Amino acid sequence: MVGSKKGFELLNMILSEGSLEILEVAKDGEPKHFTDFRELVNSRTGHVFSPNTISTRLKELVEVGALERIITKTKRDREVVGYKITPEGLKALEISYRYEEELQNCFGKEK
């Protein structure tokens, strides 16, 4: 397998705390807003992610193309920023499921 520094940067970003949780929330394909991610819980620590962490992850996921930043309107016709998962984001999420499964097999642990 051939690796590169760029590949590890992308892998590290996708595996950064909060990235997969955000993609999981967005996987239904409906536009999501920052408030939809506010209650995300870190599966490692059990704590809610900070707004700063969520904001950083959203920006990173948009930059790599896993999420699309869109403008939506509220019921009061106010414009708000939304996020929609891309086909690449869905694929990254599917890969993460397989990756988790492989690691569990590797270390002999069951879900």
Image (tube, helix red, strand yellow):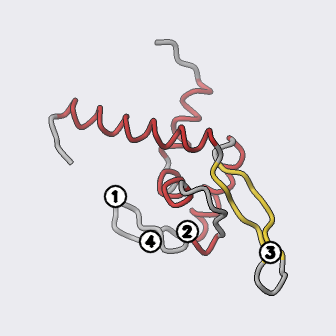
Mark 1 residue element: loop
The kind of residue tagged 4 is Val
The kind of residue tagged 2 is Phe
Vertical order, 35 against 110 (above or below): below
Task: Check whether the beta carbons of the residues at disc 4 and disc 2 lie within 8 A of each other.
Answer: no
Mark 2 residue element: helix
Number of residues whose C-alpha sits closer than 10 Å to that of mark 4, classed few (under 14), some (14–19) or many (20 or more)? some
> Residue 73 location in percent, x, y?
80, 74
Q: Nearer the viewer, mark 2 or mark 1?
A: 2
Label 3, label 1: how many angstroms apart (C-alpha)?
35 Å
Vertical order, 1 against 71 (above or below): above
Residue at x-position 67% and y-position 63%: 31
> Residue 75 location in percent, x, y?
76, 84
The kind of residue tagged 1 is Arg
Number of residues whose C-alpha sits closer than 10 Å to that of mark 3, classed few (under 14), some (14–19) or many (20 or more)? few
Q: Nearer the viewer, residue 82 or 46?
A: 82
Q: Circle 1 sits on which residue? A: 44
Number of residues whose C-alpha sits closer than 10 Å to that of mark 2, classed few (under 14), some (14–19) or many (20 or more)? many
Q: Circle 3 sits on which residue? A: 73
Mark 2 vs mark 1: which is more N-terminal?
A: 2
Q: Circle 4 sits on which residue? A: 48
Mark 4 vs mark 3: which is more N-terminal?
A: 4
Task: Check whether the beta carbons of the residues at disc 3 and disc 2 lie within 8 A of each other.
Answer: no
Task: Check whether the beta carbons of the residues at disc 3 and disc 1 lie within 8 A of each other.
Answer: no
Residue at x-position 34% and y-position 63%: 45
The kind of residue tagged 3 is Lys
Mark 3 vs mark 1: which is more N-terminal?
A: 1
> Residue 89 location in percent, x, y?
59, 44
